[in-house]
Amino acid sequence: MRYPFPVGRSDFIQGDEAVARAAILAGCRFYAGYPITPASEIFEAMALYMPLVDGVSIQMEDEIGSIAAVIGASWAGAKAMTATSGPGFSLMQENLGYAVMTETPIVVVNMMRGGPSTGQPTFPAQGDLMQAVWGTHGDHMLIVLSPSTVQEAFDLTIRAFNLAEKYRTPVVILGDAELAHMRERVYIPNPDEIEVVNRKLPANEDEAKLPFGDPHGDGVPPMPIFGRGYRTYVTGLTHDESGHPRTVEPEVQQKLIGRIFRKILDHKDEIISYETFELDDAEIAIVSTGIVSRSAIRAVKMLRERGVRAGLLKLSTVWPFDFEVIEELAEQVRKIYVPEMNLGQLYHLVREGANGKAEVELIAKIGGEVHTPMEIVERVVG
Amino acid sequence: MQIRFAGVGGQGVVLAGVILGEAAAIEGLNVLQTQDYSSASRGGHSIADVIISNEPIYDVMVTKADVLVALAQLGYDTVKDSLKEDGLLIVETDLVKPDRPYIGAPFTRIAEETTGLALTVNMVALGYLVAKTGVVKKESVEEAIGRRVPEGTEEINIKAFRAGFEEGLK
């Protein structure tokens, strides 16, 4: 396999470009999108690269069509992705729920910008955290990842595809306008350095007849592929193990939605990832995700220089959320600060996790600039 | 080292930043490049930031510039306060009238005389910067130019870069 970009060496690229290259190395061969700042460069890269790896990149009429096409492509056997920003992500919510309900592995990238509505197209924000988790209606479960560097944008995109395939679920990558457009030195690995996970296929006709069953007890049914010999029914209506609509029996809904939750929550230790920085002896903790984590690391260093025992918990997975790790942290430290580029979203999750065992304080910032490290330091030292 | 390029749209300020960043990446250094520009494709201010370090880089933009390269008065006026007190100011001397000590040359005139194209001013300024600071090697920049400029324009851009570099050695 030849790749349309250099592999096995470092390159100097934007966050958007890193997402596109990682997707291709993870096996993505279908992209559908609609241009929007600041995610358009993902589409540009996919339009350039896809024909060179025997993949498909198409521009749809809007974001509703884009995610619909991606879901269809996934059922045809392709690893598929779409990318957008706030306004487009809002349009995708209905079909994001359809992907959850039909257990379709897809990757949806949202490079967050200031909102609501068309807001600040060229400026970064983190206002879509709760939308990524709860934007579509009904009880549902999915996975949300959030990178803070261009290298992480690359690494987490590969992880997003692997998680989508392994758990037959949509995975959302939450970047932001700053990360989308910044260039950093990134290591693009050789394909043999990358672990690539592919979805389970039916091992036999019995498994193929139950595309929403649980033959392996892990909550993840094998996924038949259209055109490969089985007749499969796919619907957003509540359905039984065979996929046929059964909308009036409470136990069918309970079993289906219960399994969709369980297949992710039973494996949350494997799904959730985070990094700690100077936390061992910390009495002040900062909890952050995404681009703000960069300033938070610097803030921790500055606080340590001033004799404040501060540390950082940097979340790479936003959802499922590790409430337990926050509670443990709250037992250790005196106070937890949550800097985020919105008026308080992650803050509420952290507060729930802290469970009253430590004070939790929000450091909110909107307008389009990432917190400076000093802004965080000043709030901590008062 | 924090380096900031400031000019107006159309001067190739962002490309100069990208090429400097690429040169640093070629040398295996950690590097971050971001940009800020108005929505006008020509005429509005245009800023490119490059941070180069042996350590991990956590900043997302220049906070206190070690070097400011100003190619137009509007760009200079927009960001002049971000230059450190003892920072190095490099200016296009025909187009920028600074209110503090500086070095520089008429980069646009040098571009026109060397390549016949005023739009290679970004490469002239980049050459001057590299000669004055030694932040990256000349050869790394030339390799980066080869990777980043439109096909067929490598030679003319390298020529402009070398003219700026020579000027910087004076």
Image (spheres, helix red, strand yellow):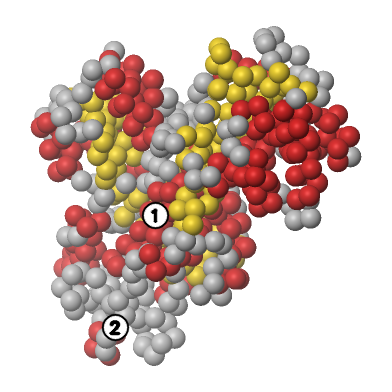
A62 displayed left or right of A330: right
Occupied quadrant, residue A125: top left
Q: Is mark 1 on a helix, strand or loop?
A: helix
A217 displayed left or right of A369: left
Residue type for callout 1: Asp
Question: Is disc 1 in the same subunit as disc 2?
Answer: yes
Please tell me which residue lies in front, A46 or B169.
B169
Badge 2: few (under 14), some or many (20 or more) residues near its Cα, within 10 Å? some
Residue type for callout 2: Pro
Residue to which mark 2 is pinned: A202
Labels 1, 2: front one = 1
Please tell me which residue lies in front, B16 or B155.
B155
Percent position (x, y) of residue A146? 37, 46
Task: Work out whether residue A318 can be spotted.
Answer: no
Q: Is mark 2 on a helix, strand or loop?
A: loop
Q: Which residue is drawn at 60% across and 71% down?
A: A51
Q: Where A8 falls versus A308 (above or below)? A: below
Please tell me which residue lies in front, B108 or A136.
B108
Read off the chain for label 1: A
Residue to which mark 1 is pinned: A155
Q: Residue at x 58, y 45 (%)?
A: B22
Point out the residue furthest to the top here.
Answer: B99
